[in-house]
Image: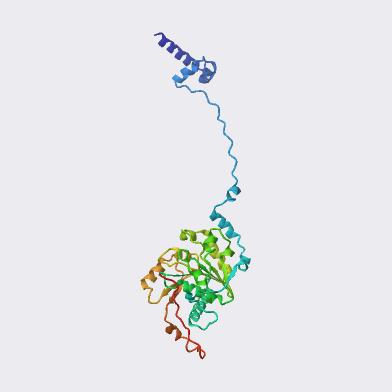
Amino acid sequence: MSRVHDALRKAEQLLESTLPPNGKDGPASALAEGEGHSLVVAEENSAPAEVAPPLEVPPPPAPVSISAKLSAPSGVARSEIRDLQVDWRNFLTRCKTIPFRPAPEAHLINMERPHEVPGEEFRSLRTRLNHMQSQQDLHAIVVTSASPAEGKTFTAINLALAQAQLEAPVLIADLDLRRPVVHNMFQCERSPGFSDFLLAERKLEDCVRRIEGTNLYFMPAGTQVRNPLELLNMRQVKYSIDAFRKVFNWVILDTPPLLFSADANLLATLTDGTLIVVRIGSTTYDSVIRAMQSLCENNVLGIVANGARAGELYSKYTYYYTKTEGEEADVEAPVDEEEE
């Protein structure tokens, strides 16, 4: 009973100390003037505890230098910086010149024999495109087909050769990174090329060659990559094509078929127009419709028919051209250089 009595006395004393008879603040003065066990009692009666001292706030960390982060970018970032440092004004003079040695199976037009039938056909195509260029902003085009083995590479190279017979420089770029064959037509190396430039492994002037004796410049596909479509989605591709349009009168891109990959579809959105090559007797109407529907933009300039018979083409020009005595007629129809 004595313990209960002592506890009641302590509670009474604490209650009296909280009253402000002398103008003192109750709980604060009790904690300041009470006995040593007052803290225990206050804890039992849910009295306010002592105010903790303010915490020391540590100083903020030193700011990180942004320039330090940019000084060591990844490989892709290096290519962005290198793209911006291309000296476009003197770019053409720094390109390597290679001899014009077309492969026998390429069936390229002979610039020394301008009256041959295939050459006339491509000059006719050149005239139509140049007329369209005079009416709209048309400098970069995609040459593709619905399916393989329809003659898209054959058409792209010969169109570029026909355009290069004029004064302005022309670029043909092999952007079929999955199955490039343009370098085989010119019998030169595949790399360095476009993929090496995008990955910042080589300078642009190292990736472009000039065909000797012409105004034609050629950029091969470059080193083989595992993700061609992801590579073509890089910002540098659009930047490069836009810059090429200011340097070359025509930029002709050879791309994969429309129905077998999305590469040509993507590149068509970055250029001014698309030429679709069909092969007479091989390409179906349904495949052409599906190929055109696969394009994101309706920028089809026209359809090029490939694979006509030699007699059908030759009959158009017999009235104007005659072969000299003893000269053997050598007229060949365009033959596709691709294989299934």
Work out which quarter of the rendered image holds the C terminus and state it: bottom left
The reply to whether residue 79 is in sight is yes
Give the percent coordinates (x, y) of residue 82. Answer: 58, 58
**Relative side of 241 to 302, left or right:** right
Placement of 30 over or under 141, stated as above or below = above
Placement of 229 over or under 27, stated as above or below = below
Most foreground residue, 56 or 80: 80
Work out which quarter of the rendered image holds the N terminus and state it: top left
Most foreground residue, 173 or 338: 338
Q: How many marks?
A: 0
**Relative side of 213 to 107, left or right:** right
Kindly identify the residue that appears in the image at 53 percent across and 20 percent down: 28
Give the percent coordinates (x, y) of residue 181. Answer: 48, 69
Most foreground residue, 55 or 252: 252
Kindly identify the residue that appears in the image at 47 percent across and 61 percent down: 228
Kindly identify the residue that appears in the image at 52 percent across and 23 percent down: 50
Placement of 33 over or under 217, stated as above or below = above
| Colouring chosen for the image of the structure | rainbow
Give the percent coordinates (x, y) of residue 23. Answer: 54, 18
The reply to whether residue 132 is in sight is no
Give the percent coordinates (x, y) of residue 284. Answer: 37, 73
